[in-house]
């Protein structure tokens, strides 16, 4: 069975995903502001409303379309981890128990405020929340338990081949350049691999079926 998600890609570079649920579509990430119209058009083709927006992390290429989408979807839930919600609001203060590393990447923030928080182990419909920090302090991934698709945000990328964002591929180094803590990120990559996903759905690149061997190789390169 193929992944049930519909990938919406902006310029072939950055992805959002529409995941069917009993009450409509869950949108995972929003690409950039220019991608909002493309996402809405894709939902229209699927013939279902977007009832919630789930954000894997607060980097600008994942939350950039949020404000425009929320204008068109005023009743949609907006969910993100509590840690990255602070980054979404512009608060870059580190937690005392975190590695005191410089935040990297674009934290442009958004006017839209979350309506709820993503918590490790909880479910959003068929999607189980998996804490996967490292790329950002509060990064999360989502496992669709119906078909074992892991929506990994930027824990892995597949542009130019499967890689972790602890160590990117030469054809796509940007995710690795924006990673906050490479060792924590690599630990999260291993955690996602241990879930034995059938499909790897990244923020950058195509969905990969039967990804386990490629994930193992990516982890080994990043170690």
Image (spheres, rainbow, N blue to C red):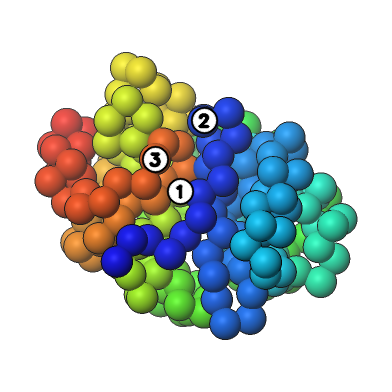
Where residue 146 appears, x then y in whole percent? 36, 75
- Crowding around mark 2 (Cα neighbors within 10 Å: few <14, some 14 to 19, many 20+) is some
Q: Given contact means CB atoms under 8 Å apart, are the residues at marks 2 and 3 in contact?
A: no
In the image, residue 178 sits, relative to residue 195, either above or below, namely above
As helix, strand or loop, the secondary structure at mark 3 comes to loop
- Crowding around mark 1 (Cα neighbors within 10 Å: few <14, some 14 to 19, many 20+) is many
**How many marks overall?**
3
Quarter of the image with the N terminus is bottom left
Q: Residue furthest bottom?
A: 22
> 183 or 54, which is in the foreground?
54
Residue at x 64% of width, y 74% of height = 24
Q: Nearer the viewer, mark 1 or mark 2?
A: 2
Give the residue number, with chain letter if any, for mark 2. Answer: 13
Distance CA(mark 1)–CA(mark 3): 12 Å
As helix, strand or loop, the secondary structure at mark 2 comes to loop
Give the residue number, with chain letter if any, for mark 3. Answer: 206
Side (left or right) of 212 relative to 208: left
Q: Residue 78 is drawn in which quadrant?
A: bottom right
Side (left or right) of 65 relative to 83: right
Q: Residue 44 is drawn in which quadrant?
A: bottom right
Side (left or right) of 11 relative to 153: right
Q: Is residue 165 visible?
A: no
């Amino acid at each position: 069975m193929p992944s049930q998600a519909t990938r919406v890609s902006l310029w072939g570079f950055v992805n959002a995903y529409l995941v069917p649920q009993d009450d409509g579509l869950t949108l995972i990430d929003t690409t950039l502001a220019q991608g909002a119209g493309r996402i809405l058009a894709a939902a229209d083709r699927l013939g279902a409303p977007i009832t919630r927006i789930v954000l894997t992390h607060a980097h600008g290429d994942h939350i950039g379309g949020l404000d425009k989408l929320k204008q068109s979807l005023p009743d949609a839930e907006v969910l993100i981890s509590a840690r990255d919600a602070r980054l979404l609001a512009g608060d870059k203060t580190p937690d005392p128990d975190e590695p005191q590393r410089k935040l990297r990447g674009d934290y442009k923030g958004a006017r839209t405020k979350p309506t709820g928080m993503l918590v490790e182990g909880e479910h959003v419909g068929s999607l189980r929340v998996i804490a996967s920090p490292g790329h950002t302090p509060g990064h999360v991934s989502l496992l669709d338990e119906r078909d074992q698709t892991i929506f990994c945000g930027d824990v892995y990328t597949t542009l130019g081949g499967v890689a972790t964002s602890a160590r990117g591929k030469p054809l796509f180094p940007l995710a690795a350049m924006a990673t906050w803590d490479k060792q924590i990120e690599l630990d999260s990559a291993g955690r996602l691999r241990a879930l034995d996903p059938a499909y790897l759905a990244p923020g950058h690149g195509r969905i990969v079926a039967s990804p386990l061997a490629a994930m193992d190789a990516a982890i080994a390169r990043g170690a």
